[in-house]
């Protein structure tokens, strides 16, 4: 199985969140990040053709290593990525063909866009920080229609707090400051990670059906959740027996919006993703004291069909927060991830992909 580096030089390269849209919808281009020094925040965003030709830098940002700038394709020419301005997060949506930044919004970015709609969350520190968008005047979850520019508040802060209380959980001062906001494929439900006093290890997972307002909550949620389809999640189930989160008992599964486990999808995992046809799943062994190998699973099988090995380096994985974050290509024949490598006496990271077409079939 061939593993290819997206770019190679005197720098590190990074991909974004697990399950990210690394490739453009027509599978013509790839977006990734470069860093000359993993200890610093200066980061460059680059694009290239899928055949790894025509590399070009398109923007400079400041961000840490954890998920990098979360760069992701929305359309064939639009990408979204995060930055930091005046010590506050912003996200930008940029046309990579013209170089035009179409939107710059001070808010917490989400995972990806669905059907041309990009969700984002606004907590108190962002109020008053978007003078070009006066409609962003309350805390909550918004949707940006990237074609029309229309911004709509879809879930208010009060909606979030009411959902938590109605499900018997205790909100705190950070509960309404949600993260990992994601629309389902039809963009008619939105999920979010919730911080609540009752779930200090894993947090809770909330979901609101936008047409009806019906709310769902999973306490002590599975981790690194993604939508499996319009009505169910895929995520890693982890267990904590009071001393540590266990690697060896983790597995990938599918869950209902209310937390019922519907089926096992794969074995050991932390950050995970599923192929578009939902027949293959990938998870990384990103746990302290272990090399953060990436595993490829056939649906329903906890034994990996392939193991993609990554050198073990606790400093880069945990101190510098570089995680493999596996993501499938649109056609399911590539598996993208971040891999630690050694360049002389210095460790760095490489954004790579494995050609898995011989395993998953043509």
Image (cartoon, helix red, strand yellow):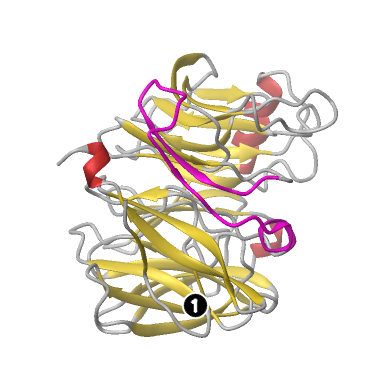
Report the quarter where the C terminus lies.
top left
Q: How many marks?
A: 1
Q: From which residue to which does the magenta span run?
A: 290-319
- Residue at horizontal 65%, vertical 63%? 126
- Residue at horizontal 43%, vertical 32%? 304
Q: Position of residue 236 (x, y in %)?
A: 55, 31
Q: Position of residue 170 (x, y in %)?
A: 78, 28
For residue 254, side relative to residue 53 (left or right)? right
Q: Is residue 313 magenta?
A: yes
For residue 361, side relative to residue 140 (left or right)? left
Camera-nearest residue between 354 and 203:
354
The answer to whether 123 is drawn above or below residue 102 in the figure is: above
* Image quadrant assignment for residue 23: bottom left
Residue of label 1: 34
- Residue at horizontal 62%, vertical 36%? 160
Residue 343 in view, yes or no:
yes
Camera-nearest residue between 113 and 304:
304
User: In the image as oriented, which residue stretches furthest toward the right?
Assistant: 243
Camera-nearest residue between 349 and 327:
349
Q: Residues within 10 Å of mark 1 (few under 14, many from 20)?
A: many
The answer to whether 220 is drawn above or below residue 276 in the figure is: above
Residue 133 in view, yes or no:
no
* Image quadrant assignment for residue 360: top left
The answer to whether 345 is drawn above or below residue 243 in the figure is: below
For residue 142, side relative to residue 108 (left or right)? left
Q: Position of residue 116 (x, y in %)?
A: 29, 54
Camera-nearest residue between 35 and 186:
35
Q: Is residue 237 magenta?
A: no
- Residue at horizontal 54%, vertical 54%? 310
């Amino acid at each position: 199985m061939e593993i290819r580096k997206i770019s190679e030089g005197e720098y590190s390269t990074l991909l974004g969140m697990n399950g990210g849209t690394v490739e453009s919808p027509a599978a013509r281009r790839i977006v990734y990040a470069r860093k000359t020094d993993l200890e610093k925040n200066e980061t460059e965003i680059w694009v290239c053709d899928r055949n790894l030709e025509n590399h070009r830098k398109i923007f400079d940002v400041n961000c840490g290593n954890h998920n990098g700038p979360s760069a992701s394709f929305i359309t064939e020419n639009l990408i979204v990525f995060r930055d930091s301005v005046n010590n506050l997060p912003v996200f930008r949506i940029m046309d990579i063909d013209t170089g035009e930044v179409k939107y710059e919004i001070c808010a917490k970015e989400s995972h990806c866009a669905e059907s041309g709609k990009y969700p984002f969350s606004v907590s108190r520190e962002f109020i008053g920080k978007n003078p070009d968008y006066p409609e962003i005047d309350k805390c909550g979850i918004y949707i940006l229609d990237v074609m029309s520019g229309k911004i709509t508040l879809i879930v208010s802060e009060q909606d979030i707090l009411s959902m938590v209380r109605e499900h018997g959980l205790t909100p705190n001062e950070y509960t309404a400051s949600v993260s990992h906001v994601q629309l389902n494929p039809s963009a008619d439900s939105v999920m979010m990670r919730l911080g609540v006093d009752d779930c200090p290890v894993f947090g809770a997972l909330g979901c609101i059906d936008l047409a009806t307002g019906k709310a769902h909550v999973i306490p002590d949620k599975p981790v690194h959740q993604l939508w499996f389809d319009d009505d169910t999640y895929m995520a890693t189930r982890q267990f904590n027996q009071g001393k540590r989160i266990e690697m060896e008992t983790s597995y990938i599964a599918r869950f209902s919006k209310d937390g019922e486990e519907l089926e096992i999808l794969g074995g050991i995992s932390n950050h995970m993703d599923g192929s578009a046809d939902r027949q293959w799943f990938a998870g990384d062994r990103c746990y302290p004291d272990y090399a953060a190998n990436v595993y490829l699973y056939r649906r329903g099988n906890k034994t990996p069909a392939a193991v993609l090995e990554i050198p073990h380096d606790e400093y880069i994985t945990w101190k510098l927060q570089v995680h493999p974050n596996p993501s499938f290509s649109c056609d399911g024949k590539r598996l993208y991830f971040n891999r630690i490598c050694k360049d002389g006496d210095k460790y760095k990271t490489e954004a790579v992909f494995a050609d898995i077409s011989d395993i998953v079939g043509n």
